[in-house]
Amino acid sequence: MTNASELARAALDEACVAVGIDPRGAEPVRIAENQIWRVAGVIVRIAPPDRLATALREIRVARWLADNGIRAVRPLPVDQPLERAGHVVTLWEEVPAHTHGSIADVALALRELHALRPPDFDIGRLDPLVRIRDRLFAATSLSDDDRRWLLALHDELADGWASGSPPGLPESAVHGDAWPGNIVRVAGSHLMMDLERFSLGPPEWDLTSTAVRARTTGAVTEDEYARFCALYGHDVTGWPGYELCAHTRELRMVTYAAQHAASHPEWHGQAQYRVDCLRGRWGARPWKWTGIL
């Protein structure tokens, strides 16, 4: 039987040929839930077959951002996404040499994005808990007790979201995963990447990412966070819905690590540490979480 990696490579080859690109010499950039490859100055993203609607939204959003003067990744001007070899494939212009953005870059990019009138096509509504249950069942390194506890937390947070968010900032288009790895610095300016979680929702969700990095993981200093708030013009931690957003973001970070630890033993320790923090085994926030991938 053809294995998953062979099918993904077949999808890459077929998609490249379909748009006139020679796939020989393709190099993997990241092999994870979505595979990222580089070939002939093009970035090819290979996703599971259930991501067609998501991929189509990403392409439309990227073009909408360009039309509104927002610097973001640019899809190739071809008819896409493509469905090949049981995968969904999108093709993008390669971003030039870049670094992680600063906290200031994230603040300014979000201020620009949230000020836009939402697009006139359907971008879906924010689903803050998307795929978390799937991740938990894929996280084979978790003990049964930890998995049950995390599933119970998931359900508790789902009830909180179902009850509705308290009044806050006007709804807007949101990036969904706004951190310096997705808002990068290129040629003296910021550029937005990874549009998979783009949707309509409370802008506080985007702001919570930086607040959590300051208050939960300690990756952002208090001075950096104060500058972030000043540049954006709002401190999300004073919003009544912040705790729900923050706990959801924490759970996403925990389950992401746990899912990937299943196939990367070197990440077992970090994944378990994150679980232990949530379960109160390592004292109060902020905790020091080491990034993976």
Image: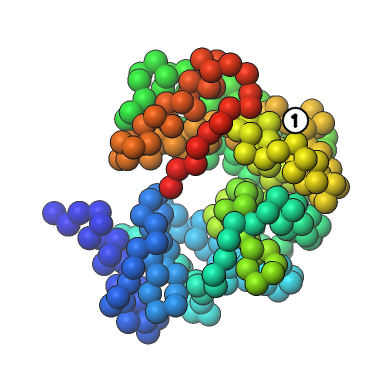
**Left or right of residue 7: residue 280:** right
User: Front-most of 41 and 194?
Assistant: 41
User: Front-most of 69 and 102?
Assistant: 102
Residue at mark 1: 241
Residue 223, percent from left and from top: 77, 40
Task: State the residue at coordinates (68%, 36%).
Answer: 214
**Left or right of residue 206: residue 238:** right
Q: Which residue is at the far bottom?
A: 20
Task: State the residue at coordinates (28%, 77%).
Answer: 24
Task: State the residue at coordinates (39%, 29%).
Answer: 269
**Left or right of residue 36: residue 279:** right
Task: State the residue at coordinates (74%, 53%).
Answer: 104
User: Front-most of 72 and 29?
Assistant: 29
Residue type highlighted by circle 1: Gly
Q: Which residue is at the far left?
A: 1
- What quarter of the picture does the N terminus occupy? bottom left
User: Front-most of 120 and 118?
Assistant: 118
Residue 121, percent from left and from top: 66, 62
Vertical side of 11 occupied by 281: above or below:
above
Give the structural element (helix, strand or loop) at label 1: loop
